[in-house]
Amino acid sequence: MLEHYISCYFNKNLKSATVNFLNSSTENVYEPFKPYDWVLGKDGKYVWDEEVTSKYDTDLNGREYIGKTLKKVENHFIKNNSWFSRYTGSKKGGFLSYTDLNSYYTPRVNMVVQDVFNRHKWKHNLVKNKSNRLNNGRFDKTNVNNDFNILVKGSNQSIEGAVCLDGHEYSYNAVINTSAISSKQLYITDYFYTHNRKGSMLAIGNTGNDLLGNYFSVSNKFVHSDIPVISVHFDNIDEMKKVESWYLKYLGE
């Protein structure tokens, strides 16, 4: 069982993450934390590559190194495209039209989702064993969720992934609420079969029209559970019930 779980977890191609706090931002654009960097692909798209850490990295493979922040991407786009092309020509639409935000969100969200479920179980075991790791908030503050950030406020991002629970893998669709005021210290706050604001513009705008039920809320003390930072939606009702059973199993002592 342990070997199955380890294989399930690591085959998801998630990077090990150091504990970093992401706090740099501009008015509308949030900056991702180093050491992972943005590069310009041969297809003209900017992508975030967790294998690249500098302009000397051999993993560039002929691509152009841009920098460690989304602001660097914007500056590069402006510098290398004329005003005419950016406003009326072939590059109309701005740098975000040529930036693959999901290249950042997909590995980061998969990491966060796996972590919050792991931490739900770990916290149960720590409480059961009366561990001092729960003292002074150390358990909640020192986690990989602080290595996740919202890049741009505006349209929500949707990514697909899978979470491994006690050796079993469950596929999900996760929607990021890009209007969330904070993406730090995330944990599972609740789960819903039917959204309690079903049909409201607020619910649709922040969770997506197809995510009004069958989802786990990943949020924090700053953001409401029913309009979470990340909605982890299990489309298959049988899988949702299995994940619910797993969650309730580790809900208390």
Image: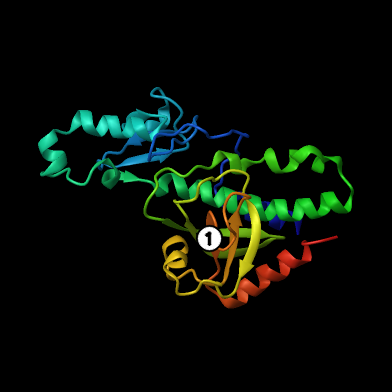
Q: Which of 247 and 49 is in front in this view?
A: 247
Q: Nearer the viewer, residue 114 or 137?
A: 137
Q: In this view, does 141 lie to the left or right of 60?
A: right
Graded by Cα atoms within 10 Å as few (under 14), some (14 to 19) or many (20 or more), the crowding at tag 1 reads many
Q: Position of residue 220 (x, y in %)?
A: 62, 50
User: From this viewpoint, is residue 61 visible?
Assistant: no
Residue named by callout 1: 227
Q: In this view, does 225 lie to the left or right of 91?
A: right
- Which secondary structure, mark 1? loop
Which quarter of the figure is the C terminus placed in?
A: bottom right
Which residue is rendered at x = 41% and y = 68% of the image? 201
Q: In this view, does 141 lie to the left or right of 58?
A: right
Which quarter of the figure is the N terminus placed in?
A: bottom right
Q: Position of residue 245 (x, y in %)?
A: 72, 70
Give the quadrant of residue 15.
Answer: top right
Which residue is rendered at x = 37% and y = 54% of the image? 155
Which residue is rendered at x = 22% and y = 32% of the image? 78
Vertical placement of 178 versus 73: above or below?
A: below
Vertical placement of 245 versus 3: above or below?
A: below
